[in-house]
């Protein structure tokens, strides 16, 4: 049996009995929705298990890139938030060097681009309008 970490603590999870969750306190419509959601989550889990980890990790790294870009595009830019996403992307790329397959070059280029964007936005923010 595995556990699921949440901000409220760890909770035991039994993937074998996932569909037999206790929905008795829900209305019939809510039970149907909960069962459909559980089936959808099981299907997503199967898709993730079938995908090579390097592709899933690369996808998450591009998510960090996008997160940084979103924070840089805010008015005013959220430099600390963007920096955290950029640092996280860099840390994962550095620690997995040589293990991310053909996406690794693209990811390194993306990291370089978002770092340049960070510097450019930071320079614009520190230069007062004339």
Image (cartoon, grey):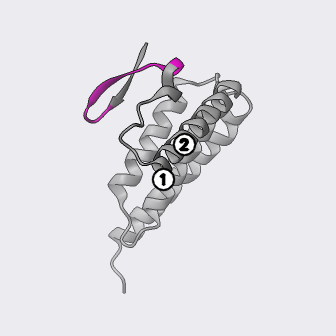
Q: Measuring 52% from the left and 47% from the top, which residue is drawn there?
A: 33
106 or 71: nearer the viewer = 71
Counting residues from the start of the chain, the first of labels 2 and 1 encountered is 2
Q: Position of residue 15 (x, y in %)?
A: 51, 21
| Disc 2 crowd, CA 10 A, few/some/many (<14, 14-19, 20+) | few
Quarter placement of the N terminus: top left
The boundaries of the magenta stretch are 6-16
Indicate whether 38 appears above or below 117. above
Q: Quadrant of residue 108?
A: top right
Q: Measuring 33% from the left and 53% from the top, which residue is drawn there?
A: 80
Indicate whether 68 appears above or below 90. below
- Residue at the disc numbered 2: 37
Tell whether position 46 is magenta: no
Left or right of residue 89, residue 3 in this image: left
| Disc 1 crowd, CA 10 A, few/some/many (<14, 14-19, 20+) | some
Q: Measuring 43% from the left and 60% from the top, which residue is drawn there?
A: 71
Which residue reaches farthest top?
Answer: 1
Q: Position of residue 28 (x, y in %)?
A: 48, 47
Q: Nearer the viewer, mark 2 or mark 1?
A: 2
Which residue reaches farthest bottom?
Answer: 130
Q: Position of residue 51 (x, y in %)?
A: 70, 28
Dot 1 lies on which element? helix
Indicate whether 75 appears above or below 54. below
- Residue at the disc numbered 1: 67
Q: Measuring 36% from the left and 83% from the top, which residue is drawn there?
A: 129
Indicate whether 11 appears above or below 129. above
Tell whether position 13 is magenta: yes
Dot 2 lies on which element? helix
- Residue 114 disc label: none
């Amino acid at each position: 049996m595995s556990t699921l970490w949440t901000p409220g603590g760890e909770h035991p999870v039994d993937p074998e009995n996932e569909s037999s969750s206790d929905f008795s306190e829900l209305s019939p419509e809510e039970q149907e929705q909960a069962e459909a959601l559980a089936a959808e989550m099981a299907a997503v889990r199967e898709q993730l298990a079938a995908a090579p980890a390097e592709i899933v990790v690369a996808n998450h790294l591009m998510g960090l890139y996008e997160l940084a870009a979103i924070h840089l595009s805010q008015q005013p830019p959220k430099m600390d938030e963007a920096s955290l996403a950029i640092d996280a992307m860099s840390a994962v790329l550095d620690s997995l060097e040589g293990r991310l397959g053909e996406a690794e070059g693209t990811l390194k280029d993306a990291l370089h681009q978002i770092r340049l964007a960070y510097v450019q936005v930071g320079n614009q923010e520190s230069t007062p309008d004339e």
